[in-house]
Image (cartoon, rainbow, N blue to C red):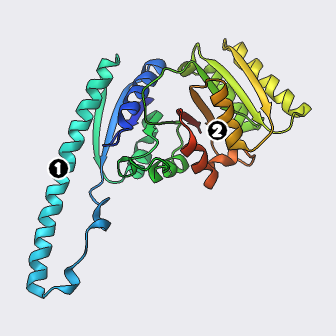
């Protein structure tokens, strides 16, 4: 299934948003929708106390047998829970208008599984945090950070909360070759057909920045988008979040990697800060 929308779901409260945004993207892109659930039977192992070293040989052997049986039971339960999640996601997508969503269950780790599947992926949709970090409101899932760094496909990160079809999107722009490619992708992508586009440069109001902003807006308008933009001075993350809030932005679009201040958002701790504080979906272009 080439060019599919892949939605990664788990037992977290983010999964409903993942389902709805994935269904929206599937319809907008006219691409197949596939839900994936990864059973990682080792994720909870470090929490289990290891008492075997303090037991006599016979008792230790018996305990190890019981632990092995317990692991098998846990794995079976995890698989069954995953199947139920996938069935629920499929039913929700059908309600959202998707004719025949597919489901996959894989064993392993989430990041390794997604990297293995990425050749068939057009867009990956996943939650801001995973099941084990569901209650940590200030926490950004470590899986998301690793996926952002290792995947080479666009990633749509969705926060918890109700789905809202985007009417306004904002792209953080710095005039670089990578960012210009992002504007061109944004302009032509059916994902944003009929959606108003805002372009924001964080920096000084120089002639060079003004020229770059004019190019971006012209590119979007030529593609049929309603487009407006701004040059704002200030700290990057705070400036972008403030603009999004003040202008009723429904989705943020960013390019990954590079050397400018904005592209450095996806290298190091600023990645965590930017994504952690976002209350709207963020599309990361690669």
Q: Position of residue 153 (x, y in %)?
A: 52, 38
According to the picture, the residue beneath numbered tag 2 turns out to be: 255
Examine the rendering and report whether any part of residue 268 can be seen.
no
Mark drawn on residue 218: none
Observer-nearest of 196 and 33: 196
Mark 2 lies on a secondary structure that is strand
| Residue 105 shown left or right of residue 125 in the figure | left
Locate the N terminus by quadrant: top left
Q: Is residue 161 left or right of residue 268?
A: left
Number of residues whose C-alpha sits closer than 10 Å to that of mark 1, classed few (under 14), some (14–19) or many (20 or more): few
C-alpha separation, residue under disc 1 versus residue under disc 2: 39 Å
Q: Which mark is residue 77?
A: 1
Of the residues tagged 1 and 2, which is closer to the observer? 1
- Asked which quadrant contains residue 30, the reply is top left
Residue 58 at what x, y percent from top left? 8, 84
What residue lies at 72% left-to-right and 43% top-to-bottom? 236
Reply above or below: 120 against 189. below
Dividing the picture into quarters, in which one does residue 239 lie?
top right
Q: Which residue is drawn at 73% across and 20% down?
A: 228
**Tag 1's secondary structure?**
helix
Q: In the rendered view of the protein, which quadrant contains the C terminus?
A: top right
Q: How crowded is mark 2: few (under 14 residues within 10 Å), some or many (20 or more)?
A: many
Q: Which residue is drawn at 49% across and 20% down?
A: 165
Q: Residue 207 vs residue 153: left or right?
A: right
Q: Is residue 124 above or below residue 114?
A: above
């Amino acid at each position: 299934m080439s060019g599919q929308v892949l939605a990664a779901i788990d037992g977290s409260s983010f999964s409903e948003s993942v389902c709805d945004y994935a269904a929206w993207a599937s319809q907008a892109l006219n691409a197949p929708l596939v839900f994936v659930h990864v059973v990682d039977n080792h994720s909870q192992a470090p929490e289990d106390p290891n008492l075997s070293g303090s037991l006599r040989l016979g008792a230790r052997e018996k305990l190890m047998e019981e632990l092995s049986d317990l692991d098998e039971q846990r794995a079976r339960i995890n698989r069954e829970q995953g199947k139920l999640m996938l069935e629920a996601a499929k039913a929700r997508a059908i309600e959202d208008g998707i004719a025949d969503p597919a489901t996959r269950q894989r064993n392993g780790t989430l990041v390794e599984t997604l990297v293995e599947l990425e050749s068939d992926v057009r867009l990956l949709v996943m939650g801001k945090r995973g099941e084990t970090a569901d209650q940590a409101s200030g926490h950004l899932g470590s899986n998301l950070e690793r996926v952002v760094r290792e995947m080479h496909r666009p990633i749509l990160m969705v926060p918890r909360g109700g789905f809202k079809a985007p009417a306004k999107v904002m792209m953080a722009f710095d005039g670089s070759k990578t960012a210009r490619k992002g504007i061109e992708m944004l302009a032509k992508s059916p994902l944003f057909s009929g959606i108003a586009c805002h372009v924001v440069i964080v920096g000084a109001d120089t002639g060079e920045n003004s020229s770059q902003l004019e190019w971006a807006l012209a590119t979007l308008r030529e593609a049929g988008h309603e487009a407006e933009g701004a040059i704002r001075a200030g700290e990057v993350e705070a400036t972008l979040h403030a603009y999004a809030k003040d202008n009723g932005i429904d989705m943020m679009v960013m390019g990954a990697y590079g050397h400018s201040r904005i592209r450095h958002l996806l290298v190091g701790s600023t990645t965590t800060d930017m994504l952690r504080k976002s209350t709207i979906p963020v599309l990361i272009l690669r």
